[in-house]
Image: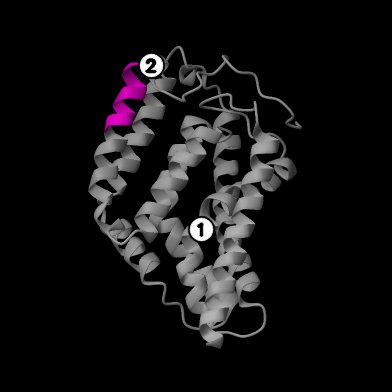
Amino acid sequence: MKAHAARSRTTLLLVAAAVAAWAVTVERMRGMDAGPGTDLGGLGWYLGIWVTMTAAMMLPSAAPAARHVARLARHVPTVLFAAGYLAVWTGYGLVAYAVFRLVTSFDIGWLAWDEGGPYVAGGVIVAAGIYELTPLKRLSLRRCRSARRPGAALRSGFAHGLDCVGCSGGLMAVLFVLGVMSLFWMAVVAVAIFAEKVLPRGHRLAPLLAVALAALGLWVSVSPASVPGLTEPGASPSMGMEP
């Protein structure tokens, strides 16, 4: 009975945290989508919004693993698990920020949206689709869905976060190239991640996602203006970001 209560409490806490994070994200990011190549702002501002975004998108799909840890661990296991889990995604976000700053430090006129930008964005999306079919993706997805993390809650959260990055890092890269401040694409990617990791037959979705991503990548490359939900750079100025 106590184990069941702990698992139920864990689910409620993570769902509540995700709902709160979505509310904050929507409030802070409304009107900020500048499409592919959206400037990430100052590091402090970026980290604040990135942690909130990942909590909103990822915590629901981490609930099965957190419920298992709550059954075994003591002393605020949900908080410790979530802290370890989000720490890994924060590391992913820092790497993405560093890559963005490195790329934008060079003369990248050829990446302009009216030149090679759509082809580069489309290529990244197609690459994410190919990644869905790789052994590393299959292994990471299987480990994510197993929800078996022995050991302390913090260490378990960290381990699950590493598996989750291996499983969903490609999909998050798609979010970056489509517009990391886009609420629409955030929701689409979050649904895809949840479906793969949590739904009963989610492990069978990888080939379908691969085809969908390949098609989307080609669409973005050939006719980006016709892609629903895609803001073309220059069409929507960013708001509220600090340099």
Q: Residue 36 at what x, y percent from top left?
A: 51, 27
User: Is residue 72 something that shows in the picture?
Assistant: no
Q: Is residue 227 above or below residue 138?
A: above
Q: Position of residue 109 (x, y in %)?
A: 51, 17
Q: In the picture provided, is 183 more to the left or to the right than 174? A: right
Magenta stretch: give its range.
Answer: 215-223
| Left or right of residue 68: residue 142 | left
Question: Chief secondary structure of the magenta span?
Answer: helix
Distance in Å between CA atoms under marks 2 and 1: 32 Å
Number of numbered tags placed on the structure image: 2
Residue in the picture at 30% in, 41% down: 129
Residue at the spot 38% in from the left edge and 35% down from the top edge:
124
| Foreground tag (2 vs 1) | 1
Mark 2 sits on what residue? 226
Mark 2 nearby-residue class (10 Å; few <14, some 14–19, many ≥20): few
Query: At numbered mark 2, what does the secondary structure look like: helix, strand or loop?
Result: helix
Question: Label 1 neighbourhood size at 10 Å, few (<14), some (14-19), many (20+)?
Answer: many
Would residue 62 be found to the left or right of residue 25 on screen?
left
Instruction: Using the image, determine if residue 188 lies above or below residue 108.
Output: below
Q: Which mark is residue 60?
A: 1
Residue at x-position 49% and y-position 63%: 62
Amino acid tagged 2: Ser
User: What amino acid does circle 1 point to?
Assistant: Pro
Q: Position of residue 130 (x, y in %)?
A: 27, 43
Q: Residue furthest front?
A: 1
Closest to the observer, 110 or 139: 139
